[in-house]
Every structure is written in C-alpha cells, then in structure tokens.
Image (cartoon, helix red, strand yellow):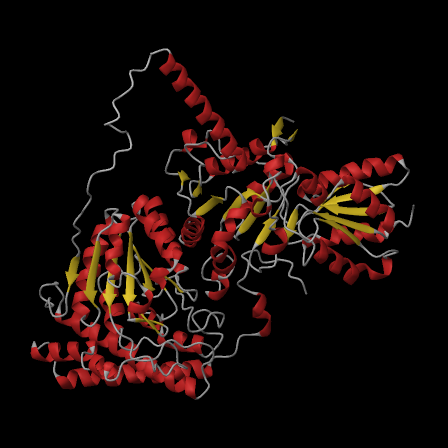
Amino acid sequence: MPELQFREAIRAAMVEEMERDEDIFLMGEEVAEYNGAYKVSQGMLDQFGSERVIDTPISELGFAGLGIGAAMNGLRPIIEFMTWNFSFVAFDQVVNNAPNIRYMSGGQFKIPIVFRGPNGAAGQLAATHNNSVESLYSNFPGLKVVCPSNPDDAKGLLKTSIRDDDPVLFLESELMYGMKGEVSDADDYTLPIGTARIAREGDDVTIVAHSKSYWRAMEAAEELAKEGYDAEVIDPRTIKPLDIETIVQSVQKTNRCVVVDESNPFASFASEIAFQIQDQAFDWLDAPLVRVTAPDTPAPYAGNLMDEYMPSAKEVIQAAKRVMYVD
Amino acid sequence: MANETKEKQKKDASKDEAAAKAASNGAVDHAPWTTQSIDIPDTSSETYEFQTYPVGAFTHDDLDLSDDEVVEMYRSMMLQRRFEERCRQMYQRQKISGFLHLYIGQEAVSTGSVSAIRLGEDTVITAYRDHGIGLAMGMDPGECMAELFGKADGCSRGKGGSMHFFDAEKRMFGGHGIVGAQIPVGVGIAFAHKYKGEENVCLTYFGDGAINQGAFHEAANLAQLYELPVVLVCENNQYGMGTSVERASAEPDLYKRASSYRMPGAIASGMDVFSVHKAIKDATEMARTGQPSLLEVRTYRYQGHSISDPAKYRAEGELDDRQSEDAIVRLQRYIVEQGIASDEDLEAIDEEVKQDVLDAIDFAENSPEPAPETIYEDIYVQDDYPFIA
C-alpha cells in the first residue's frame, strides 16, 4: 500500500470522485490558483480547470449558501473552509439551511454537499483560530459529521461523504495534514459513514478518541501496556451518526471508559458518549466514565498555556488509572 | 492564517532586501517620485444609468401578450387575493397556526414575474411571504391550504407551514424564513444552471429588509463575479416588519446598490403587472447571457407584517392612498377599457377562483394530520439513519 500524507489522501479522494462524476466541483478560498491554503487541492486546477476548481472571495456566508443552492439544483459541491473557524460567519447556511431545507420541503429537495476543512487546535493561534466544531455542529439534525484520524480513513470516508446524498461536514486537521500513513490502493476504496474502528484491542479499559486525540490515546495505551494494563482504543471516525454499538460492546468487556476529545467540555461530544454509555451499559460500568477534554476556557496563545490546554497522553493515562482504580 | 502571514512576511522582507541591494548597486534607476504604481486620480466621479419601468408605461400589445394571457394574469392575481383573504379568516378560526405573512397588495409582482419566465424550467426562490408566487407558479391551492392547516397532503407534508412552500416540479425552490438567507442559495441555483450549460435563470426574491443583510452583499458580489444567470429581485413593500425603508437603508433607492457590484440596476412599479412583466423579461434575457442584475420592484402590503401586526406604524391615510392604486383594480379597468373582456366576464372569474379557494379549504379540512412517525422522515436521504430514540 502506498504511503500518503493526510492532505494527499484527501486530494486523492476528491480527484478520484471528480474524475468519476462531472457534477462534483470544489469551491473555496485559495483552492485553485494558490493550490490550496494548506496544499490539499494542489494540482487540481490544472487537472480540472477553473470551471470545477473555483476560487472564491473571502465570503464564507456567500459561497456556503451558493453551494447549498447548487446542491438543490442537481450538483454535488465540495465547499472548502480554509478552517472551520471561518464557518462561523456562514453559520446560518451550515446549520439552518443545509440540514433543514429537505425537511421543510417535505423531502422534495436533497442537499448532497460536503463542507470540509481543518478543525480544532492548530498551534499557537489564540482563541478564534482554535475552535473544535464537532460538538456544536453534531447538535443539528440533518447534518452528518465525519472526523478521521489517519490518511486511510480520510480517503475512504471522504469518497463516501462526496457520494452521500445528505450534507456532510468533513473535519480535518491542520496539524495532521503532513502526517503520513498507508492508504489502501484498492480500486474505488470507500469506507462507510457511521462505523467506528477498533484500533487496539484490550480488556482493561476502553478509550474512545477521534482526530488528534486518537493519537494521544494510542500513546497512552502504549505506556499503559508497559505497566501491564491493556487498553482498548476505539476511533469513532464519524461523530454523527455515532457507532455507539461498537463502543458499548467494548465497555461491556472492559467495564471502564475514558473519552478523549479536544473540544471544550460543556455539552461536548465526550458528554454525549458518556450519556449514551450510561444509558446503554449502566450495569456493566465499574467506575464513572472520565472525560479528557480541553478546559472550559478559550484556547490561549502562550506555548506553555497551549500545552496545558490540549489533552495529553499523560492526562489520558491518569484518567485510565482513575477508572481502573489504580495508583 | 498565522502560518501564511509569517510566510508572506518572509517573502516581503526578502523582496525588500533584494530591492535595497539592487539600489545600493545602482542597478535600479529610481523612478522620479512624481509617478506612482498606486495611482490615485485627482478627482473621481462616475455616472450610472438605471432602467425604469413606471406605472402605465406599457400596454399588453407592447409586451406581445395575447388577450387570453392578460385575462389569465387577472385570474392569477385574483386567486392570490381570494386565497389570502380566506387565510386570514382561517387563521382567526384557528385552522392555521404559526406565522402568517400575507401578500395582499403585492400580487402584480408575482404574476408579472411568472408570466415573463419559462415556467417549469426557470427557477424561483423567495422569502417567507411566499403564498403569492407559489400560486402564481401554478402550485395547487388545495396543497397550499393543506400546508397552512398542517396536514399530510400539504405541499411540504406539513413540515414547512406558511413560510416554506416548495414545489420541485414547478421549480419553486422555496419560501425561506430567515431574512436574506435564501439570496446566496438563489445564486447557487443559478450557478448550477450555468454549470450544467442550461439556459435557465433563477429569480431570487427578497424584501427591502433583507437587502441590509450581509448575505445580499455576498451573493450579489458572487453573482457578478461568476457571471451567473440570476435576477436579484428586491420586493420593496416599504416596511421590514415595522421599520420603513427610510429608517433602515442609508440609500433608500435600493436599486442603486447594483452599481456597487458593477451590475445593471432597475426599478419597476409593483402596482402595474405590465411594468413588472417587462422588467423581469428584460432582466431574464440579460441573465441568460450571463449578466445578473438587481431589480427593485416597489409595491405595498396592505396587511401588517404578519397576521398579529396591527400596523400602527403607517401614516394616517397611507393605506387608503395605496389601496386606491390597487394593481388588480388597475388591470380590471384596463381589461374592460381595452375591450378584452367585460365586467361580467371578470366577475365570473372572481366567482371561479372564490370557489377554487373554498375547494382548497375543503381539501385541507379533509386531509389527515401527518402520521406521528413522519417526524423522522424527510430529514436524511439515507433511509436507515440511526436516530437517537
């Protein structure tokens, strides 16, 4: 299997789908002539031309709405947000038009659109450029939210997202764009939305983590193994719809659970998982579930404060030990 | 962003270094300070021209409309008027709930527009005062009334209500409830027309209130930038809820905003169905060649913003003055004066549409309520979506 960067896997997914279906186009800030703010769309203008790879002015509300209209009228837009932080000026379109038009029209229209771009903390950029949007957007019925942690999942899930007839928010990560990983070279490789991946099997504690947090969880699992504790790590991959079944089955085996999520804690994805586990596996739990999240603060600028802000492997280890009642 | 800013600063710095080096070598013959690459003219002024479509400027012959077509315009406008009069009554009888924004007084805008487009191919999207254009496009009055009654046979299966009439087959892309939010969507519908190589146009309606939303500005800019087949129709009924245009817009001549986007702007009387027809015809012809435009149609709503609004913000006598210029009465007189049809003929049409509306009420009354499980339908195309129980 070839080794690709995360950004190359995303590009490969878009290129393959655009070669397959002429109704797909890519639109966003700097996606064409600049070759992508983060070089995700590098070379795509040359391959597909300016009719299908389209630069926009800095006008997120405008081009997010344009994408929705184009989708209503038969196209399959991929709308890139330079980062999800900038989607907030298009909030009305993303949360009030994309998911509701189908419902309010009694099912007469579908909105096969992908909004994609990097999500979550991206270094010392301060509060407005470090938002994690998965908890926020997954609150809205009518949207699907996908958040892969590695290049292989990114490619398979993005291809499926583009083919999906419902609006999909595809959350990437600036800090992971350069990360390399083996990517399936199977012909027309797709992965289903709404299926979690058991990344590491273990019997002592279940750790649920997505995107960057997944890698903190894996580091923690390796350290815990050295101390004789066998953690099971589950990457949900899709925030909504959530594959709670896989998580619950794991908790029924380990009886303990830690959720790692770099979002702020209040009303977060981690909270939702905690609720669903107590709802479906209360009798199997030997300890209250523990969350490892960002603190209930905006993201800071200073390096040491940012280290404090982000969930770390060390915190995951501590949380795992807490639910296992060790130390 | 921050990373890029850094990169750019680095680039700029190295450029400056190179320039300084070149200068110290004497390689650059420094241009005299009198010429500048950033050239600001001493004065700047520009003149804009806007097309106007005043009341009474066009006869049906000017517009190549047949007698039958003119009579159909009358029928269309009367249907809207009678439908909405009954809506008001049905609201008072608590058959209709939620918000109810009536279009009475503005019927020349919807009918004048729809008569000028390729109905069934061209697309239309509008705001929440959407009954008029829906009916003018040929949506079934029974299904529309059933929607208002919250019934299963409603045009949106009881999921949308008054503000959200949709008819995919008629190419009616919706009534939309959030002020201005439908404008970028309309531009996107037009984008798809162009992308697919169709010759169709999207009429994108919004009110005088919506023109102050950022969504309008962004959509207008994109429309011209991408040369999209869209007509941005600002239906100026003088009030955004209770706030008059003068109190809301620094430039109350709304059509003049077109010049900010380098697109044609025009203004038409919304009290004359022929003026609207001609304005939309001209604008759609331009749009089909890739030239979007902004058309302000000045009209007047006789009712309050919604059914619960007594409209006390109007000046004394204002409503009476406006009603004396009623577009339906105007067309009625025109038809009779021109000998197209008699008063009796028109009265018969009125009776027919009144009956159509009564039939629509019957249909709505007899339609069942939506089945409880349909609350989970029409959300995702995926039919086995695992909703949280």
Residue drawn at (51%, 79%) of the image: B368
Residue drawn at (16%, 67%) of the image: B274
In what quadrant of the picture does the C terminus of chain B appear? bottom right
In the rendered view, tell whether residue B99 sits above or below residue A271. below
In the rendered view, tell whether residue B2 sits above or below residue B267. above
Residue drawn at (17%, 62%) of the image: B278
Residue drawn at (13%, 71%) of the image: B67
Percent x, y for residue B307?
39, 81
In the rendered view, tell whether residue A264 sits above or below residue B86. above
- In front: B383, or B291? B291
- In front: B360, or A226? A226
In the rendered view, tell whether residue A174 sits above or below residue B347. above
Percent x, y for residue A26?
45, 40
In-image side of B96 versus B243 (left or right): right
Seen from this angle, which residue lies furthest bottom?
A: B93
Percent x, y for residue B91?
42, 84
Report whether residue A40 is seen.
no
Q: Quadrant of residue B265?
A: bottom left
In-image side of A92 versus B53 (left or right): right
- In front: B213, or A9? B213
Percent x, y for residue A125?
58, 41
Report whether residue B53 is seen.
yes
- In front: A115, or A136? A136
Seen from this angle, which residue lies furthest left?
A: B338
Q: Quadrant of residue A57?
A: top left
